Amino acid sequence: MIPLMKRFALFAIAAVLILLSAAETRAAKRPNVVWILSEDNSIHYLRLYGNELAPTPNIEKLAASGLVYDNAFSCAPVCSVARTTLAMGIYAPRGGFQYHRKSAVAGLPQGFKVWTQLLQEAGYYTSNNSKTDYNIDVDIKQVWNDSSRKASWRNRPDKGKPFFHMQTFGTTHESSLHFKDAEMRREQLTTPKDKVQLAPYHPDTPLFRHTYARYHDKMKRVDEQIGELVSQLEKDGLLDDTFIFYFGDHGGVLPRGKGYAYESGLHVPLVVRIPANFKEWADFSRGDRVKGFVSFVDFGPTVLELAGVKVPELMDGRPFLGKAVSRKEVNQRDTAFGHADRFDEKYDLVRTLRVGRFMYHRNYQGYYPDGLQNNYRYKMLAYEEWRQLWNAGKLNGAQRQFFERRPAEQLFDIETDPHQVKDLAADPKHRQLLLDLRTRLTAQVKEINDLSFYPESHMVQHALGDPIAFGRKHSKGIARLVDIADLALQPFGKARGRLNAAINSKNEWERYWALTTCAVIGEPAKSLADAARKGLKDDNLMVRLRAAEFLGLIKAEDPRPTLYGILNETVSSDEALLAFNGAVLFNDFEPKYPFDLGQVKLKARKGEVTRRTDYFSGNLK
């Protein structure tokens, strides 16, 4: 018989071994991660970010058990580009998936896998309910274990398996504001219209107030849906093991939000609930507000970090949460890069750099106003009323900006001007800051080998097999095009010689960018009109387009014969779409050249081209 003291000692040793085993099991266990997205939602519609008219109690409850990120950004202000960025962790203009809607999908770099596949290989169950909307060539069945309206962590065969689940709520989608006059008159809203705070660029009308109030009501409903989903996790006993991310899939949907590279289109809410069993994995205290900047390229790497999976070197982002991530380092991050290209049928080319309280805009095609026709945008009555008031001359300076050409560069102080209506680019007090941010943005564009410096038609034909490899191969050429575009930032007298040389270059894309830059400069570049006229006969149709735009804007030539010729000759829908962009510009804005669709016999009718033909034929629905 074992003596009592010896039995006690053996019992104590066994107890210690059991505790050590439990600790090892706890350390070996991996957390679950759930992403909850509300569509088309910027920070401006939540009480958590200062809007007292917008309580979201369920989101606020998540925040009380976690973190609120004050500076979280989508890289692009539209869904397909934003979601593909989330899936890839790569800047879209580098990866060739920057256009919405895609005319062709971008291939992945050789050997690269979407990070949810890496999670699966590491033993995670991945589910998505249910929006994908990717601009890349992937098999959804490989990217997700289940992507459907029924997808849930509850469907995983092995309930002991860790999971990543992505849930999207479309309640706040742009289409929720596509109401008719009769619907507005009978609709009863819970948000008081007289209390909503309008952005200074919006006219104060009953229609705008109703649109704001309706959106606030939609936010209340999406908050309820978020609460219901979190309750499911709680019922399943999973809250203590699950990181919950809530965020908007890009900026808000009120006019000049979605589709525009301002704070309203890029600055998203982000709340992360920290689970009790993994609280030591966050170098933050529950309830903290994180000041450091994070953006969509960082979200995938963060989940990989939490799951203990190595982040691929090809990704542009960095984890902002996890065992190896320090609060001090995250809070020192102060920079976010943004981009805007084509949205449906409307082309633009904007790059932004937010550094601390300042935001720098580089408008590479600033002669296209923000308010250029986009059929889907103008389904919203508020957009249509805004344009009617502009045409009637009833808007003030801040409200008119949306319909005016933009300068090549702009600078905004977000702290004193959160709605970005006061451009500081010409302010001598901010000159050094402007030059610094200009230099940094130019370096960023060159570093990623920004593929938008080729027209979409060229990118689709030549780059989409492996866009990143193509960009690397043509890095020096892209840098030269950036330099030509940046001649718009110099006094014209200093830039004239280089612009003239570029207009006469043997390189077609240098000619293309020289003429684009002349259009951005406008009247001061009028002395280059004769050189530009040669571009009207260029072998490259897109060079012809840029020549016609420049000469039309300075009233040196009627651009329509060239536009008709391009549209009748091209077999590329991408080329036709870009030519139609110029046609809408001259049809709707000064100097006006009314466009006659009857002059056009299109050969290229795929993709978004029909949106433009519908507009000119008055066939909008």
Image (cartoon, rainbow, N blue to C red):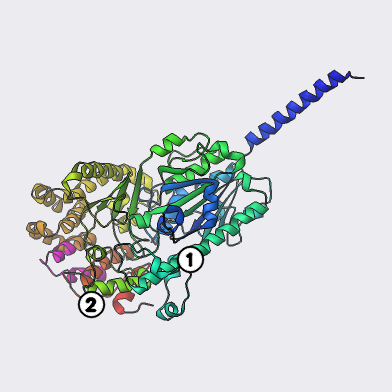
Above or below: residue 119 compared with residue 49 = above
The answer to which image quadrant residue 610 occupies is bottom left
Residue 422 appears in the figure? yes
The answer to which image quadrant residue 333 occupies is top left
Query: Residue 596 bears which disc, if any?
Result: 2
How far, Cα to Cα, is label 2 from label 1?
Answer: 41 Å
Q: Is residue 558 magenta?
A: yes
Kindly identify the amino acid type of the residue bearing the numbered disc 2.
Answer: Asp
Kindly identify the amino acid type of the residue bearing the numbered disc 1.
Answer: Lys
Crowding around mark 1 (Cα neighbors within 10 Å: few <14, some 14 to 19, many 20+) is many
For the point 13% across and 52% down, which residue is it? 504
Estimate the x, y position of residue 384 in percent, counting from the top left: 32, 73
Q: Is residue 35 magenta?
A: no
Nearest the viewer among 397 and 349 is 397
Q: Regarding mark 1 in the picture, which secondary structure is present there? A: helix
Q: Which residues are magenta?
A: 548-571
Q: Quadrant of the C terminus?
A: bottom left
Left or right position of 33 against 198:
right
Left or right position of 85 against 278:
left
Estimate the x, y position of residue 327 in percent, counting from the top left: 46, 36
The answer to which image quadrant residue 99 occupies is bottom left
For the point 48% across and 35% down, which residue is it? 325
Estimate the x, y position of residue 378 in percent, counting from the top left: 35, 71
Q: Main secondary structure of the magenta part?
A: helix
For the point 40% across and 57% down, which residue is it? 44
Query: Residue 218 bears which disc, if any?
Result: 1
For the point 55% across and 61% down, which residue is it? 224
Q: Quadrant of the N terminus?
A: top right
Nearest the viewer among 329 and 89 is 329
